[in-house]
Structure formats: C-alpha cells, structure tokens
Image (cartoon, grey):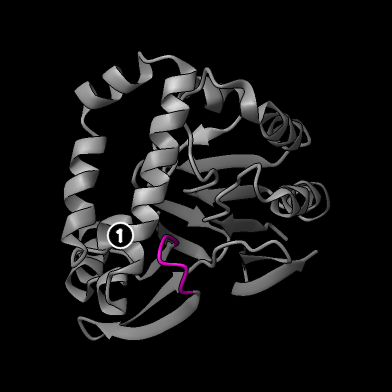
Amino acid sequence: MRTALLISDLHLSRERPATLALLRRFLRDEATRAEQLYILGDLFDAWIGDDDPEWNDVIGWLAALSRAGTQVLFQHGNRDFLLGQRFVEATGGQLLAEEALVDLPSGPALLMHGDTLCRDDTQYQQARKLLRNSDFISEFLSKPLSERRIIAEDYRKRSGEATSLLADDIMDVNADAVADAFHRHHATTLIHGHTHRAAQHAFELDGKPAVRWVLPEWREERAGYLRSTATGIQSHDFLS
C-alpha cells in the first residue's frame, strides 16, 4: 500500500541533541517504509545558507533516505526559508512551492507551512515581507558565516520574546485566510504546521466537507507525524 508521511517544525538545533537522534531513528526506521516524506518547513531552527557545513550529517541522513527509494519533499518554513538548491540537490530531494496541491495516497491535499495563514499576527507578517525580500536575502548571504550566525541567533532571541507577548488567538490561523487558501486551490484537505497546535479540524466550506490537519512540533521525546494511505490520513507518534 502506497504511504506518504508528513512532518514539520522539528526546529533542529545542536542544543537539542535528543531531537537529532530521534530524527535519525525516524528516517531509518519509519520513513524508509514510505514512498514519500513531506517536510513542511522549519526542519531547522535556523538556516543561514547552503554553504554552512554545520548540518552535513542531517543532509547525509536525508540523502541516504533518498537513495533508499523514499522521495523527500521540502517546503520552506519561517526559520529555514533560506534552504536553497544546493541543499535540495545534496539531499536528493525536491523543493515544493509555498502552497502546493499534491496527490497524496489518501487524495489531493493542499500543503503549506502555515505562517501565511496567521494574518492577525501583523508584526510577524511585516517582518516576513522584509526577510523574504530578494535584496535582503542577497545582502545576508554575502556576509561571512560567523556574522550570519550572530544575526540568526539575535533574530531567534527577539522572535521568541515577541511570541511570548502575543495573545493565543493572534498566534493561531485566521479563518478567512484558511478559507481563501481552500478556495484558491479548490481543495478539501489542508495540511500545515507552524502553529504547533496539532489537531484535526473538520468543518463545512461552501456546503461541502473539508478538513484542516495541523502538524505538531517535534519534542525531544516525541515525533508527531501524519501517515497518508489509501484508507485516509492518521496521526501517529514516533517515540524516543
């Protein structure tokens, strides 16, 4: 039976070695039995450029999975939107569009990281426009790796402080943004991460059934993921 796995928000960091070990086991023991592995953003807590050798071990694990026959597909997250072609080629994977309508074993599904759905977080949306600007990206990538690391660490700190001050409803998706995404792609299933609020939301849209799956963030002892087969989509945990 054809199987696809979907994960997001691993936020890999050398400060969390247990999560790294969990990923290595997941790729070896679980993902090798699937035809596709979709990583919907924020694989890394920070990505400062494809020329950074810090994550060569993870690249090697993903490349091994590709060679074993599992197709690996990536979307950018808000923490690793600088993942580029060099990284993709090194892993043997494929980079998907920011909004990708794909044919899962369970049927068509719209895949997103999910940050663009959080319209009410206007401070983040403004910062996102700046960070995704091509001139800003070119200037950042032209800096030495050591300087980029300092900038990324400062951004992570300030981002965490700002997030802690926001109301819960601002951090979650905006209902109109969700409806707009469904309409743009004529979708009935949406899968995303970013909010760290794992859930299955079933509802009606234009009088028809629709479902929105939210992927969990990974923790050091638990890796949450979705499994898509011909019988449907199920939520699972891969434990340490």
Whether residue 35 sits left or right of residue 125 in the image: it is: right
Residue of label 1: 162
Whether residue 20 sits left or right of residue 129 in the image: it is: right
Q: Quadrant of residue 139?
A: top left
Residue 11 in magenta?
A: no
| Residue 44 at least partly seen | yes
Q: Quadrant of the C terminus?
A: bottom right
Image coords of residue 239 (percent x, y): 77, 67
Q: Residues within 10 Å of mark 1 (few under 14, many from 20)?
A: few
State which region is magenta. 193-197
Q: Quadrant of residue 237?
A: bottom right
Image coords of residue 149 (percent x, y): 47, 29
Whether 217 is drawn above or below 134: the answer is below
Q: Which residue occupies the foreground of this view, 11 or 106?
A: 11
At 34% from the left and 50% from the top, the residue drawn is 158
Q: Which residue occupies the foreground of this view, 78 or 208?
A: 78
Q: Quadrant of residue 205?
A: bottom left
At 63% from the left and 48% from the top, the residue drawn is 36
| Residue 96 at least partly seen | no
Q: Which residue occupies the foreground of this view, 43 or 92?
A: 43
At 19% from the left and 41% from the top, the residue drawn is 129
Whether 206 is drawn above or below 66: the answer is below
Q: Quadrant of the N terminus?
A: bottom right
Whether residue 86 sits left or right of residue 113 in the image: it is: right
Q: Which residue occupies the foreground of this view, 215 or 56?
A: 56
